[in-house]
Amino acid sequence: MYTASAAMLEALEEAGVSFIFANFGSDHPALIEAIAEARSLGRPIPSVITCPNEMVAMTCAHGYAQLTGRAQAVVVHVDCGTQSLGGAVHNAAKARIPAFVFAGLSPATQEGEATGSRNEFIQWIQDVPDQRGIVRQYMKYDNELRSACNVKQIVHRSLQIAHSDPKGPVYLVGAREVMEEEAERVAIDVADWPPIAPTPLPEAAVACLVEAIQKAVRPLIVTSYVGRNPAAVTELVRFCGRLGVGVLESVPSYVNFPHSDPLYQGNQWNHPFQNRALAEADFILVVDSDVPWIPTVSKPSEKAAVAIIDVDPLKQSTPLWSIKARQCYRADAATALAQLNARLDRIELDEEAAERRRRHYSELHAERKADLVRLEAPSRDVVTPEYLTACVRHVVGPDAIVLNEGITNYPAICDHMAREKPGTMFASGGGSLGWTGGAAIGMKLAAPAKTFVALTGDGSYMFSAPSAVHWMARRYRTPFLQIIYNNRGWKAPKFSALAIHPDGFASRAEDLDLSFDPPPDYSGIAAAAGGAFARVVKRPQDVERAIAEGLRVVLEEQRCAVLDVWLSHLRFAS
Ligand SMILES: Cc1ncc(C[n+]2csc(CCOP(=O)(O)OP(=O)(O)O)c2C)c(N)n1
Ligand SMILES: [Mg+2]
């Protein structure tokens, strides 16, 4: 039998998709049959990973793509499974993550007209007017497979769209009867479905940008995700070094610049104050950022000239968005930065001016570094996020890959992990919590020899469906070290409320309905679900040893280790 489902598997395999993160249902008999048939006949198909939770499935694909740039497949059950993808769809869309999502549709016939016709009560209940509408605003492309004869072409087109900048998830649906239909095998050359080539800067723009930076006293580059392509970081370091341009990260979701580089000027998140480097800059180049600054809190000077380079400079999927940029370029960052560097090779540089700029930024860099060192000192009776993160850094080393979902501790994790190498730290890039668990599994599947360290808030750990995550981590041998920054609740909404109502009732209230007291046994959940090593850590003097033991378990015993580290309670912390 060669059905539409077999054709879909064949297309995924020939497109180089390695994994299908699957959560099956009554819409998938043809797919389940085609998978079993392929296995029994020795036909190559992607590996199937059973995902007891759809949000975790989508997040596995998210993590895999962050590490490799490659879309993986996610298979879910009709409208219900599509809804259960939940916030992971938002995360993939916002972070421009390529992913291929397929959901069945309830059968389109009810009298036995075709194989797959309705035979279960649920198929009337799960028939909804617009299943694709559930996720359409997050998908770069959605379509229905209506015939078995061109399934492969539609799969390849959808992957071509997913992998083209700005990248994103795509969604296909197919009714049960269509997925059961027999098909003629179609020969496809995947080379005929390439993603669009990276867009360069116009040559006039290259000259104009270099001139503006050479004339500036305090040129600054602001970026959030240029490091999604490590080659862009190499170009950025070279460019900034030659001209003495400072680099400020805003809400970084990748390693964009080595933290030890004297031109590195730190990272800004929800810090409630004006950033100095941003205020002092007279020329700002925003490269790959969705939120380069928050104007009510921190913004460039009125006199600063601003330019943007981005694959999506208009942020077309964000209804309210604008920054006052006089130059705006749709271009691939690595290509654009290589063009800028090539121009520097051709023209004469004002070396003295570059040196003055380098000296200035190096001084600020050194001040920042000294502040960070001070913050890492252990306190006697409470574990601080800065101390905890410094311990993680010492134990796991520079090559471990860190997943940061620290929420109010995003900045502490970013600052004190102080990553040097592109591709050694990630955040979700989206706004829906619960990314670290699935992402760690997806990344570990992509790079089994690497060590992964997931750092998460306690609330975010709960959002991640840890029972599903840790069952999967054991079942598919994807061990990682997970550390919970446990402040016994949701500190971020407290910050949000007090930022708007600093002296209101909430500021004086005992209980803001944000606390998890008494907290669950977080690491115990992972132990029960997946045999993880579990430990609760409350004293500063126990932190480093616990991390070392957790890492040993991950490396030697090949199982997850979850450390539940108690920080000060959100009720008392500032
Ligand atoms: C799916 C989802 N639900 C709710 C929120 C709103 N939210 C943002 S931060 C936050 C608290 C996160 O708690 P935790 O991970 O413990 O970090 P903390 O704020 O304590 O640092 C919540 C509930 C969200 N962003 N995503
Ligand atoms: Mg918390």
Image (tube, grey):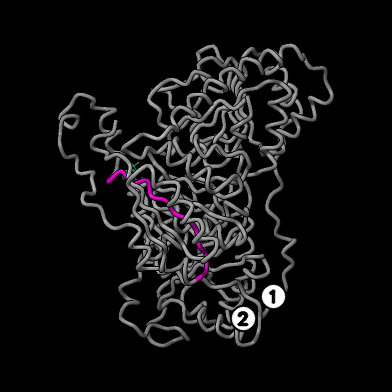
Please determine whether, in this image, residue 528 is positioned above or below residue 254.
Answer: below
Residue drawn 71% across the image and 21% down it: 243
| Contact? badges 2 and 1 (CB < 8 Å) | yes
Image mark for residue 183 = 2
- What is the three-letter code of the residue carrying label 2? Ala
- x, y percent for residue 450: 60, 56
Please determine whether, in this image, residue 154 is positioned above or below residue 450.
Answer: below
Mark 1 Cα within 10 Å, few/some/many (few <14, many 20+)? some
Residue drawn 50% across the image and 62% down it: 479
Quadrant (top left, top right, bottom left, bottom right) of the C terminus = top left
Mark 2 Cα within 10 Å, few/some/many (few <14, many 20+)? many
Residue 443 location, quadrant: bottom right
Q: In this view, does 9 lie to the left or right of 115?
A: right
Q: Does residue 70 show up magenta in the picture? A: no
- What is the three-letter code of the residue carrying label 1? Val
Q: Give the range drawn in magenta.
A: 476-489
Q: In this view, does 49 lie to the left or right of 330?
A: left
Image mark for residue 186 = 1
- x, y percent for residue 248: 55, 27
